[in-house]
Amino acid sequence: MPPLFDSEKCIRCGMCVRDCPAYILELDKKRDRTPRVIEEYRLECWHCGNCRISCPCGAISFEFPLYTLV
């Protein structure tokens, strides 16, 4: 599962995009510059947590399906 972005907490600094080693994130220039996962690469997320760690606002989280937590 790719990262989830809370647009209310996000300050649109782009640090998550810069720190993603898989290069699957981009700033959504069409709307409000909130980071998003590039759709064709959404399954390429490594779940490394670099984006979440680099976010100064805590706007990024991950949701894992229950079967992966067992």
Image: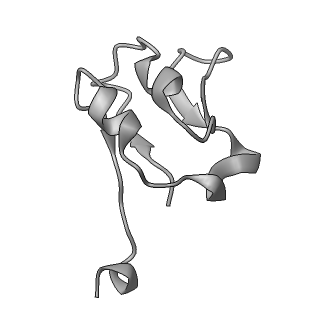
Taking the spot 38% from the left edge, 80% from the top edge, the residue there is: 68
Taking the spot 44% from the left edge, 54% from the top edge, the residue there is: 47
Q: Nearer the viewer, residue 47 or 11?
A: 47
Q: Nearer the viewer, residue 46 or 11?
A: 46
Q: Nearer the viewer, residue 30 or 36?
A: 36
Q: Position of residue 59 (x, y in %)?
A: 29, 32
Does residue 27 sit above or below 4 in this rendering? above
Q: Position of residue 33 (x, y in %)?
A: 54, 15
Does residue 22 sit above or below 33 in this rendering? below
**Residue 69 sits in which quadrant?**
bottom left
Does residue 40 sit above or below 27 in this rendering? below
Q: Residue furthest right?
A: 40
Q: Position of residue 51 (x, y in %)?
A: 40, 35
Could you tell me which quadrant the C terminus lies in?
Answer: bottom left
Q: Position of residue 4 (x, y in %)?
A: 42, 45
Q: How is the image coloured?
A: one colour
Taking the spot 38% from the left edge, 38% from the top edge, the residue there is: 50
Residue 59 appears left or right of 47: left
State the count of labels: 0
